[in-house]
Image (cartoon, grey):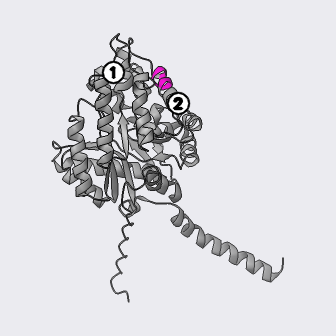
Amino acid sequence: MSVRMLLFTLGTLVLGAQAAPAAAAERYYDANDFAYVRKIDAHVHLHGPSTLFMAQALRDNFRVLTINVDYPDFPPPAEQLKDAVSLREHYPGRVAFAGTFSVDGFPSAAWLEAAEASIENAREHGAVGIKIWKNIGMSLQDAPGHYVMLDDPHLEPVLALIESRHLVLLNHQAEPLNCWLPPERMTVRSDLEYFREHPQYYMYQHPEMPAHDAILAARDRALARHPHLKVDAVHLASLEWDVDKVADFLERFPDARVDVAARMVHLKYQAVQDRGRVRAFLVRYQDRILYGSDEAYGPGDADPQAVTEVHRDWLEDWRFLTGGATLHSPDFAAPFKGLQLPRSVVDKIYRTNAEALFPRAWAPALSLPRPAPVAAAGAH
């Protein structure tokens, strides 16, 4: 090798070594970027004015989608709608919402009329989607005592209306698979605690109730009948225990999306054994996954500690998705490493996928500027 070529090669190696850290800094976010990057939490439940919650969301550079739910632990759907409209008006461009309908009176003609009126009313007030909750499949029964599934013919007009109005169906059918397992086989502590506190939804204790796969099969039949329906299958489509199962769902329904709300812990749990598989799933389906937390905040949460915990949860999810450090979860004992997803993937999961699925839901928001570094003493 000539001296000139040797010098060129050495120079290239030196420049490459200098450029590598810069390239890495360009490609990945870190914990310090959290507050300065535009983000959307596409799955929260806000009730009342939620002043402290929204102040924290603004500090953390989040826009939000608050979702109304036909859930007995929440206020009645009409009250939820009123709160959602008020929040949207008080925080223009920052808050969007999804409506819902009640199953009271199902399946009478009066019920259908009321359900369709609720959907139309929500849409007229700015709703971008309609939520159908897990009571379809897990608690609602018809007159003969059969559990009502999403493919029930009486729900067909509702699905058709959502589709014709170009609203997004946010469907939550079934629960985590842990719901059908005995306590000693549950994988994460939060599921164990939830079903201990909500035994009416703990299917392991109710073998007379539908099986997990039966509920999801009915959901899939309903979705197959509406190939043009925009779908956000929340909670990782209730297939949270195995990213390969979620991938299969996304392959079978190529226009569907999923969110990670309240199921990030299951991705962390899988990362203990196979971080690469979890990371590959998020990279492969980067255009079809939305960030959501499932944080619920209402009039009774005026304690600042409540929003401190929201901020902590948001930050823990960010560290898992963006960083590569060894992490720990209170939900299980084993440590796991962060996924260190590229910036382009993080931006899709945290923002652009939600903007694409819910166009015109939020006004454009700029990334907050990073503060300039403070000059060292004596510097010129």
Identify the residue shown where x is 43% and y is 26%.
Answer: 150
Disc 2 crowd rating (10 Å Cα; few below 14, some 14-19, many 20+) is few
Question: 329 above or below 225?
Answer: below
Residue 11 position in % (x across, y down): 69, 78
Quadrant of the image for the N terminus?
Answer: bottom right
Identify the residue shown where x is 65% and y is 74%.
Answer: 14
Occupied quadrant, residue 261:
top left
* Residue hosting label 1: 107
Identify the residue shown where x is 30% and y is 43%.
Answer: 122
Give the magenta part as a residue range.
Answer: 213-218
Whether 216 is among the magenta residues is yes
Q: Earlier in the sequence, mark 1 or mark 2?
A: 1
* Residue hosting label 2: 225
Cα gap from disc 1 to disc 2, whole angstroms = 20 Å
Question: 40 above or below 167?
Answer: below
Q: Residue furthest bottom?
A: 380
Quadrant of the image for the C terminus?
Answer: bottom left
Residue 46 position in % (x across, y down): 25, 45
Residue 259 position in % (x across, y down): 44, 42
**Which amino acid lies under the numbered mark 2 shown in the image of this protein?**
Arg
Magenta region's main secondary structure?
helix
Occupied quadrant, residue 10:
bottom right
